[in-house]
Image: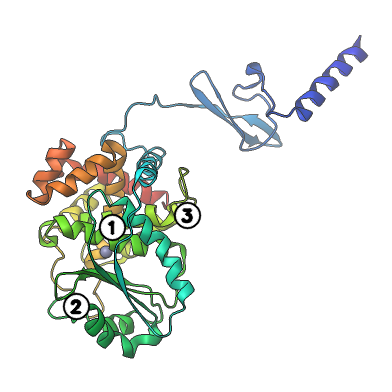
Amino acid sequence: MKLNKMTLAGALISALVLGPFSAPVSAATVKPGASCTKIGLTKTLKGKTYKCIKSGQKKVWDKGRAIAATQPLTFDNLDTSRVRKAAYAEIAAGVRSSTTFVPNITFVLGPSLAQSRVEQEMTGLNRASSFWSDLYKPQQVFVSYFTEADVDWVDNAVCTQAGYCPTGMNPVISNVIKQDLPNCNSAMATRNKDGVPFFDQCLGTNSNNAKNLQTGPHEYTHWVQQAYADWGSTPNWWTEGSADYFGNTLGAYNGSTVPSQLDEMSYGSSYGWIRQELCPLSNPTIEAITNCFMYTYGGRGVAPGQGQRWTLAHVSYYMGSLATEAMIAVKGLGTFKNLIKDLKTSRFDEAFEKNYGISTQDFYPKVSKYVLAMYNQSR
Ligand SMILES: [Zn+2]
């Protein structure tokens, strides 16, 4: 009898190992402290998720974690395990349903630049122009790409060929290149002297890492904003943060599954967020982050001093990107696009409350909690 039992057990194990599908685990074996086969394996049973963990020399199921009922996301339950996925699903659906639109772009290309590097940029740019085409279809735009080797060429070229001859707040591109060396990967969207959309982007040193996938769609998103809103009237967290968010998601887009590099790209924007001095966040709290959201009002802010050119943007990118993500996760892409449209006639806070059902004052503490939670997860 004993022998028979062992044979039977052996036969069962073989069947499980050889079966073409993942081995069904008997419900009775999944309970806290019962042995399991592989560290990290998870099983869901009766509203709880159990994980196989190491306990001394043994592998056992942990005590389990209750699965949150799938309540709709609201600004009061911005769960870090759900928001990124939910918002990205909206972006992916938006990309899939968009109609192809290729704007008439006049390129002003630095002599040092390889054509292949320009074509690499076009993927994200074309995705952005189609994605936004229900709101924005420019007749004509200018784009200038170059590297740091083109520093002596660029100012005259963009002025004569793209009509960007900077005055006032608009930066002189060769100065930007020199300030940013040894990196050359920054970009800026604006309008040229005739009011035609223009952006420039350095495709030089360090312009090829994951975060730079966002740059083209980021600048394109600025053009969309500019078609509806006076930048002087929108808080910078929204202006830069939404450009960062759409830049990341459209730049890294590869289908319906959340791109693997999205966490890294998102967290990459916290580099300047935490280091800037305009709104100290060395030890961020919900209250400090809420205050930083308020700080970004006043449009693009006063011109920062030498070497501080991007400091207001650095307050805005990370927390503004996460706020945009939360807005899209909770109310969908359509509502976000409606907000943009309403900026044609409404002040930002008014348009926000109309579309989101709460005031910005009530929104900031709620979303700051999400920002802090994501920051603590380095996402
Ligand atoms: Zn920007």
Q: Name the residue under label 3.
A: 261
**Label 1 neighbour load within 10 Å: few <14, some 14-19, many 20+:** many
State ligand 1's quadrant.
bottom left
Residues under labels 2 and 3: Cα distance? 33 Å
Q: Name the residue under label 2.
A: 305
Task: Give the residue displayed 43% in from the left and 55% down from the top.
Answer: 252
Q: Do the residues labelled 2 and 3 touch (CB within 8 Å)?
A: no
Q: Confirm if mark 3 falls within 8 A of ligand 1.
A: no
Above/below status of 305 relative to 339: below
Q: What residue type is labelled 3?
A: Gln
Quadrant (top left/top right/bottom left/bottom right) for the N terminus = top right
Closer-to-camera residue (261/366) = 261
Residue 267 locus on image (x, y percent): 39, 56
Q: Confirm if mark 1 falls within 8 A of ligand 1.
A: yes
Above/below status of 144 relative to 286: below
**Label 2 neighbour load within 10 Å: few <14, some 14-19, many 20+:** few
Picture quadrant where residue 268 is located: bottom left
- The tag earlier along the polypeptide, 1 or 3, is 1
Q: Name the residue under label 1.
A: 243
Residues under labels 1 and 3: Cα distance? 17 Å
| Residue 164 visible somewhere in the drawing | yes
Q: Do the residues labelled 1 and 2 touch (CB within 8 Å)?
A: no
Closer-to-camera residue (267/87) = 87
